[in-house]
Amino acid sequence: MFVHILFTWLLANLLHPLLLALAIYLPEGDTGFFSVAEFISVLIQVSFYSLIISLPCLFLGWGLLYVIVSTKDIILVKFIEWLFASAMLIVLELMGIIFLVDDSVEMEHLLFTLPAIGATWIAIAIRYKQFRNLIGEHKTNDPESDPV
């Protein structure tokens, strides 16, 4: 189960700088950078910081996925729960970081979570087949589902 979380987390962290770049570029049409090299340098820095900052989400997501997989819901409901739980982890982590730095959370701060949530949802959707396999493996290893 940890391998599934790790690969999904890595894929989301690869997608996050791309979605962040789109979020910066699309509304204004200009990034404000002088060159493409400077823009790529910033994307690499964002990727590095994203990996470091999102480490708690990796470990908390591992625990949450274990809980979600252990429920008796159908696969589609588990998948929707996983999407919702991953988005909530991102929002809670950002709120925690903001509370460490500042005492108030404004709605504008929550806009920074949108590229991360989008990247996470895309990564989860790409890995849907592996998610189904994970659910199937858990059912076959579950002693309660073993007929006597």
Image: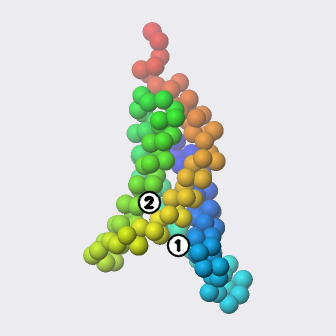
Q: Is residue 82 above or below residue 76?
A: below
Answer whether residue 136 is visible to the viewer in this image. Answer: yes
Amino acid of disc 1: Tyr
- The number of discs equals 2
> What x and y, as percent, mark residue 67?
40, 39
> What x and y, as percent, mark residue 61?
45, 50
Front-most of residues 66 and 124: 124
Q: Residues within 10 Å of mark 2 (few under 14, many from 20)?
A: many
> What x and y, as percent, mark residue 48?
57, 72
> What x and y, as percent, mark residue 79?
51, 40
Residue at x-position 53% and y-position 24%: 140
- Give the mark, 1 or 2, whose residue is nearer the N terminus: 1
Label 2 near label 1: C-beta < 8 Å? no
Q: Which residue is mark 1?
A: 49
Residue at x-position 41% and y-position 56%: 89
Amino acid of disc 2: Ile
Q: Residue furthest bottom?
A: 34
Q: Could you tell me which secondary element the residue under label 2 belongs to?
A: helix
Quarter of the picture containing the C terminus is top left
Residue at x-position 53% and y-position 68%: 50
13 displayed left or right of 88: right
Q: Residue furthest right?
A: 36
Front-most of residues 93 and 76: 76
Q: Residues within 10 Å of mark 1 (few under 14, many from 20)?
A: few
Residue 90 - label: 2
Q: Is residue 78 above or below residue 48?
A: above
Residue at x-position 50% and y-position 68%: 52
Q: Is residue 97 above or below residue 137?
A: below
Tell me the CA gap for discs 1 and 2. Answer: 14 Å
**Quarter-of-image position of residue 108:** bottom left
Residue 9 - label: none
Q: Could you tell me which secondary element the residue under label 1 belongs to?
A: helix
